[in-house]
Image (cartoon, rainbow, N blue to C red):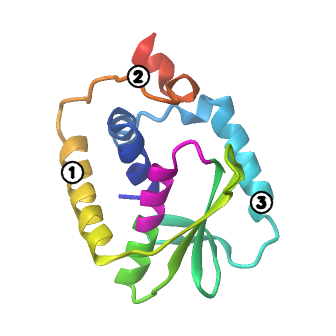
Amino acid sequence: MNGTLINYYIHCKRQCYLFYNKLNLEDNSELVAIGRELHENKTIDRENANISIDNISIDKITEDYVVEIKKSNADVDAATWQLYYYLYVLKSKGIMKKGKLEFIESNKSKKTQYIELSEDKESELVEIIKNIKEMANSNKIPPAKRIKGCHKCAYFEYCFI
């Protein structure tokens, strides 16, 4: 389990299933490459940036926050749950932090969002993790559904062409 899977599950269950089962089409995506480059430029030469702990890769940690940097705020809900997962993993190690989402290219005026992992969100997250494992280990691929952002997805051709 990792943050990317949580993000994909919230955004698109089919994408989550395919990625979990090692069908990675992102290496061929120009938009993914642009996002990675913007992310690298945002965190390069920054203290406490790009930290790997177990199976998670945290963009940045400050005294109070775990910071997740996203190219855009196209799917705030998926990014938020990804950050909840990071807070959950850190909490399991005795590290208590709040979350901060930063959007490099915001479509709205709000470029930063703050979150905290409540007991309710943690319970929901545990259920999401359980659902991901069940779905990803089944032999049934979730059906392709056109949703906002499909045309920009690395899996678009696989799903629709």
Q: Is residue 52 magenta?
A: no
Instruction: Report, in whole angstroms, how far the alpha carbon at label 1 lies from the one at label 3.
Output: 33 Å
- SS state under label 1: helix
Disc 2 crowd rating (10 Å Cα; few below 14, some 14-19, many 20+) is few
Image height of 66 relative to 149, above or below: below
Q: Is residue 52 left or right of residue 135?
A: right
Q: Is residue 122 left or right of residue 96?
A: left
Circle 2 — which element?
loop
- Left or right: 83 in relation to 73: left
Instruction: Give whichever of discs 1 and 3 has the lower sequence position.
Output: 3
Task: Indicate the quadrant where residue 19 lies.
Answer: top left
Q: CA distance from mark 2 to mark 3?
A: 31 Å
- Upstream in the sequence, badge 2 or badge 3? 3
Residue name at image x 40 percent, y 89 percent: 94
Q: Nearer the viewer, mark 2 or mark 3?
A: 2
Q: Over which residues does the magenta segment extend?
A: 73-84
Identify the residue position indicated by label 3 in the image: 42
Q: Can you give x and y, in whole percent of width and height, for residue 109 in the image?
A: 70, 52
Q: Give the percent coordinates (x, y) of residue 136.
A: 25, 42
Which amino acid is tagged 3? Lys
Q: Nearer the viewer, mark 1 or mark 2?
A: 2
Residue 67 location (% of width, % of height): 61, 69
Q: Which residue in the structure is indicated by mark 2?
A: 146
Toward which corner of the image does residue 118 lie, by quadrant? bottom left
Q: Which residue, given by chain and number where applicable, does mark 1 sit on?
A: 131
